[in-house]
Image (spheres, rainbow, N blue to C red):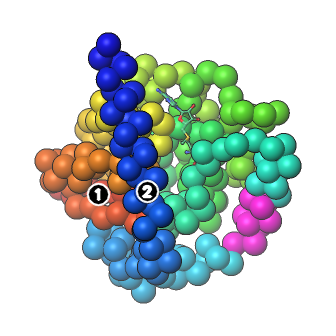
Amino acid sequence: MVGLLRDAIYAVRKARLDVERRRLDYGRETRERADRLADVLPASAADLREYEREYEDLEWFHDSYADSVAEIHDAGVATDTTHWRDGATIYVVCRALEVETAVETGVLFGSFDAHVLAAMEENGGGTLHSVDLPGGPPGPFEYGHLIPDRCRDRWELHEGDAREVVPDLLERVGPVDLFLHDSDHRLPHMRFEYETAVDRLAPGGVLASHDVRLSKLFDRFTAENGLRSCVVCDTGIARRPRR
Ligand SMILES: C[S@@+](CC[C@H](N)C(=O)[O-])C[C@H]1O[C@@H](n2cnc3c(N)ncnc32)[C@H](O)[C@@H]1O
C-alpha cells in the first residue's frame, strides 16, 4: 500500500516535471553554467568556461560518443539517457576539482559515466565506481555502452540495488570526491543515497544529483547539511566545505 502510494506520488511529480521542462530555457541554463558553478566550486567562471571549451573540442570523446548514440538509436531502443548538457556540467566539475574517486548510481547506457571518465582521462587519473541493478539496459547492449574504450579501464561496475551496494562501496572506496545520484528518483531512495553519501564525501567533495527539479529535496537536503549548491539544467551540484 505504502509502495503504491509512493509510486503514485512519483508519477504525479514526474508528470509535473515533464510540463516544467517544456518551459525551462535550457539555452539560458547552459549559458549560465560557469557562473552558477563558480558560486559553488573553488574556480572562477572564466576557468570553468575554459573547461566548457575544452569539452566542446574533445574530439576523441565526441566521435566515440556519437557513434555509440547512433548504435542505440539504430537498435530502436527507447532510452532514459541523461542529456549531454548535464554530462557537460559533470565534466566541468570533475575537471575543476580534479576528481580522483567518484561513485555514481544509475548507469543505463552510461552518459554521465562517459563524461566523468572523459574528465578523468584529461586529468590523467581517477576511478569511477558505478552501481546499477542486475541485468542490463534495454536492447543488445551492456551497461555503459556510451563509455569510450579509451577510458574503460578507469571504470568499475557494481551490479546490485544501490540500497545494498552503496553503503559498503562507500565504506571501501571513500572518502569520495564526487557522489552522483541518478538511479531511483523516488524521494525516500534519493534521500537514502544523499544521506549515505554526504558522510563519505571528502572535504571539498561534491554531492551531485540528476532530476533535482522533481521536488525540493535536493535544496532542502543541501541546506540542512550546510552544503553550498546550485542547479544547472536538470543537475544539482553541492559542495562540502573544506573544513
Ligand atoms: C535514468 S537511468 C540512468 C541514466 C544514466 N545515469 C545516464 O547517464 O544516462 C536510471 C538507472 O537507474 C537504475 N536503477 C533504478 N533503481 C535502482 C536501484 N535501486 N539501484 C541501482 N540502480 C537503480 C536503472 O536500472 C537505470 O539504469
Predominant secondary structure in magenta?
A: helix
Residue 175 seen anywhere in this rendered image of the structure = no
Ligand 1 positioned in quadrant: top right
| Three-letter amino acid code at the position of disc 2 | Val
In the rendered image, the vertical position of residue 66 relative to residue 186, given as above or below = below
Q: Where is residue 110 in the image (x, y as percent from the top left)?
A: 63, 46
Q: Distance between the residues labelled 1 and 2?
A: 29 Å
Q: What stretch is highlighted in magenta?
A: 58-66
**Mark drawn on residue 239:** 1
Secondary structure of residue under mark 2: helix
Q: Position of residue 7 (x, y in %)?
A: 39, 27
Q: Find disc 2 in the rendering and name its residue.
A: 19
Q: Residue at x 42, y 68 (%)?
A: 24
Q: How many labels does the image show?
A: 2
Residue placed most toward the observer, 242 or 157: 157
| Three-letter amino acid code at the position of disc 1 | Arg
Residue placed most toward the observer, 105 or 183: 183
